[in-house]
Image (cartoon, grey):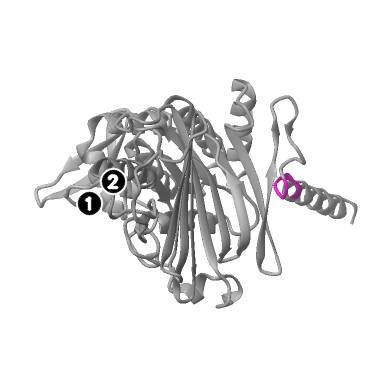
Amino acid sequence: MLSKLALQNFKAWEKCAIDLGRITVLIGPNGSGKSSLLQALGLLKQSRNQESLVWNGPYESLGRFEDVVSHRDLQRRIEFQIWLENEVPPDLEEISGRFECHYCYSLDSYGPVEHKTEYRFQGGHSITSSYNFQESQGTIDTSPKGLLAPMVSAPGSVVAVPFHGRATRETLNSIRTLRDTIRNQLDSAFVVKTQRIINEGAYPSKSVGLGFAEAGDVANFIAYSDEPRLLLSEWLSQIFDDDVELSARFLSDSQVALELRREKESTNVIHEGAGVQNIIWPLAQIAAAPSGALIAVEEPEVHLHPKAQAQVGQVLTEIARTEDKQILVTSQSEHILMSFLTEAVKSGVSPGDFRVYYCTSHNRMAEIEELRLDPNKGLDGGLKGFFEAGFDETQRYLEALIARNTG
């Protein structure tokens, strides 16, 4: 489970760190850096196993270093950090129980500078390794000494344990096992952007994996997955307060069409409203993701009626609670946030399970503040920037009515 994400000098963020709960919500005005946090996840995912960061890949297309470094200042270093918690793999005989991992990768305009991995195990055991690309030199430390057999440090790939090379076979197997815990966690991180509409009458039939790069991937996952299709129908019925069934129909020209059935009538999804077309993709990605996965969804409320937005919050809360999945969303909707808060208070979740961050921007630099949850009192400081707008508009409306009736 990913427990923390930190950025430095990436886009609008000079520095940012967020703890990730079972549900994490990012709110704030447009241009305050919320989407950049999701882009960082996608960037790290597409860069795993590579020699350096892949700026333009299947999940993110960000240009070049100078396009994403803060203030376009080429003297700065960009840094990414992730933390995760997991069970020690069973084939590591020397240690057992749970462990925490901290991975850090930094680069400048010339390329990688350093990456470092630290593992902390129950009982006080630890393994720390780092590699400095500019000095072509690495270090490896263990506690207690001799926890691993001696080895030679080498660069490794992005998002990996930065050491491998000459060592005993048993030691190398241990290193690969630890390395794979990071890679596997990023394999199980999925980002769903706002450009996710299912608006084609049919898509070419094909095999797909668990991550979706285009709408056709979503359609084919639904078509070939019976159990997730039933889950999606259940979630959609809850969101739209209607008995609906999502189905797939295979056409004669090797195409697959998605349909929604209400009562006895089926309709191609292309004839549904934009709200329906936009919510299917994130729900399908959540259904496809394995246990322990992190699914980040950008503005799940897109084109949805306020009542449906509130229902989305309930559905996502239930998923996070019952399916061992992490949900990270950015949102502009007070209906979704209030729904999350209501469910959190009802179920008595701990502040660590549900986290809310308020993002702002000053002088084109993003800032972030965690709004602490007290199940008895709600959020410290209230919902910044949300209800004030509604109150202001209501006041203006009442003033206009008074002026009209008294004029």
| Residue nearest the viewer, comparing 22 with 30 | 22
Q: Residue furthest right?
A: 406
Q: Position of residue 391 (x, y in %)?
A: 77, 46
Mark 1 closeness class: few <14, some 14–19, many ≥20 residues within 10 Å:
many
Q: Is residue 244 visible?
A: no
Q: Amino acid at mark 2?
A: Leu
Q: Is residue 115 visible?
A: yes
Quarter holding the C terminus is bottom right
Can you tell which quarter of the image residue 148 is in? Answer: top left
Query: Is 386 colored magenta in this rendering?
Result: yes
Residue bearing the label numbered 1? 202
227 vs 183, left or right, is left
Mark 2 closeness class: few <14, some 14–19, many ≥20 residues within 10 Å:
some
72 vs 85, left or right, is right
Q: Helix, strand or loop at disc 1?
A: loop
Quarter holding the N terminus is top left
**Separation of marks 1 and 2 at Cα, in angstroms:** 48 Å
Q: Position of residue 69 (x, y in %)?
A: 54, 71
Magenta stretch, main secondary structure class: loop
Q: Which mark is residue 325?
A: none
Query: Is 71 colored magenta in this rendering?
Result: no
Q: Position of residue 289 (x, y in %)?
A: 35, 38
Q: Is residue 157 above or below residue 277?
A: below
Q: Residues in magenta? A: 384-388
Q: Which mark is residue 172?
A: 2
Identify which residue is drawn at 80% across, 53% down: 396
Q: Earlier in the sequence, mark 1 or mark 2?
A: 2
Q: Position of residue 255 (x, y in %)?
A: 16, 50
Can you tell which quarter of the image residue 178 is in? Answer: top left
| Residue nearest the viewer, comparing 178 with 286 | 178
Q: Amino acid at mark 1?
A: Ala
